[in-house]
Amino acid sequence: MNLIDLIDQNRSNHYKLLVIVDNDNQHQKIIDKLKDDGWAAYDVTKNIVEMTKDIPENKIKLRIGEQIKKWVKSLPEKIILYNTNILYSPELGRLNPVGAFKYKSRDREIIIFVEGHTSGDRIRYSSYEREDHSEMDVSELIHVRMEDIDV
């Protein structure tokens, strides 16, 4: 699949959230390809750590959603989000990248990189017995494995 075709398809999707499953940390290829087209890239873990440093530990699960919403609203209209695994952590209420950004992508275009295993319209992160296990429904989103993209 051609990257530009995927972005064009995503632009007409209701949520405008392109999900790329990247288990080999290859996001830089996409960032390099799109940086001259007005796309800006953000390390989610770095930004979440910054957001939570002033929140009392027992309030993080309650406040992180609002903090993410404010952060996304402050970003440009074309954003790439990578290093998203922190969102699965129990300390953040076991959010997942799709859930955290799906409804915030309507007024901007977002490409998000996630790790996991695809099975039809679902992406599974981690294994069932682990605290950070998550299953994401991506049936309403354009989603693709990194290895299937022609960059």
Image: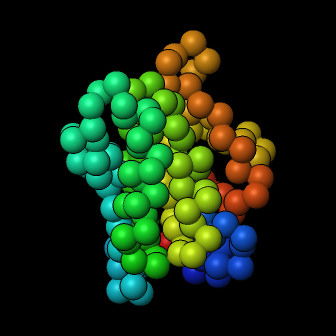
**Residue 42 in sight in this render:** yes
Quadrant assignment, res 123:
top right
Q: Quadrant of the N terminus?
A: bottom right
> Is residue 21 depicted above or below 129 in this figure?
below
Image coordinates of residue 141 in percent, x first then y, are 70, 60
Image coordinates of residue 9 in percent, x first then y, are 69, 77
Quadrant assignment, res 76:
bottom left
Q: Is residue 70 left or right of residue 102?
A: left
Q: Is residue 71 left or right of residue 124?
A: left
Q: In the rendered picture of this protein, how many numbered marks are placed on residues?
A: 0
Image coordinates of residue 37 in percent, x first then y, are 41, 87
Q: Nearer the viewer, residue 22 or 121?
A: 121
Farthest residue to the top: give it: 129
Q: Is residue 142 left or right of residue 91?
A: right
Q: Nearer the viewer, residue 34 or 69?
A: 69
Q: Nearer the viewer, residue 92 or 37?
A: 92
